[in-house]
């Protein structure tokens, strides 16, 4: 652990910083998967809303 000393002899403990990296843009396959998952979520939510309104 990295410790630093202040005036008066107090020690401060700092967390280790994680390594930084650059994110990569999504591939065409990942983009397609995002679209499919989004369509599935919209379908499921609209079905759930329909059931909720028809029951009430």
Image: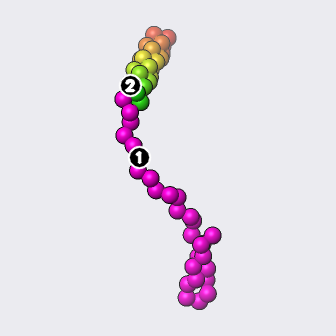
Bin the neighbour count of mark 1 within 10 Å (Cα to Cα): few under 14, some 14-19, many 20 and up: few
Determine the residue positioned at 59% across, 89% down.
8
The residue that disc 1 covers is: 23
Check if mark 2's residue and mark 1's residue have beta carbons within 8 Å: no
Q: Residue at x 58, y 83 (%)?
A: 5
Quick check: is 18 in the magenta stretch?
yes
Instruction: Please state which of residues 48 and 14 is positioned toward the viewer in this rendering.
Output: 14
State which tag comes first along the sequence, 2 or 1: 1
Q: Which residue is mark 2?
A: 32
Residue numbers of the magenta segment? 1-28
Task: Describe residue 11's horizontal placement relative to residue 27 as left or right.
Answer: right
Asked whether residue 6 appears in the rendered view, the answer is: yes
Can you say which quadrant of the picture contains the N terminus? bottom right
Disc 2/disc 1 C-alpha distance (Å): 19 Å
User: In the displayed structure, does residue 3 sit left or right of residue 36?
Assistant: right
The dominant secondary structure in magenta is loop
55 relative position to 5: left or right: left
Q: Residues within 10 Å of mark 2 (few under 14, many from 20)?
A: few
Residue 42 appears in the figure? no
Q: Secondary structure at mark 1?
A: loop
Q: Name the secondary structure under disc 2.
A: helix
Q: Nearer the viewer, residue 29 or 51?
A: 29
State the residue lying farthest toward the top: 54
Magenta stretch holds residue 22: yes
Image quadrant assignment for residue 10: bottom right
Image height of 13 relative to 31, above or below: below
Image coordinates of residue 52 in percent, x first then y, are 48, 16
- Residue 44, how many percent across, how many down? 46, 18
Q: Residue at x 57, y 79 (%)?
A: 4
Expressed as whole percent of the image width and height from the top left, the position of residue 15 reads: 57, 65
């Amino acid at each position: 652990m990295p410790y630093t000393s202040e005036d008066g002899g107090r020690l401060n403990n700092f967390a280790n910083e994680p390594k930084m990296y650059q994110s990569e843009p999504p591939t065409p396959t990942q983009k397609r998967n995002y679209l499919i998952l989004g369509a599935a979520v919209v379908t499921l939510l609209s079905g759930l809303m329909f059931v909720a309104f028809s029951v009430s």
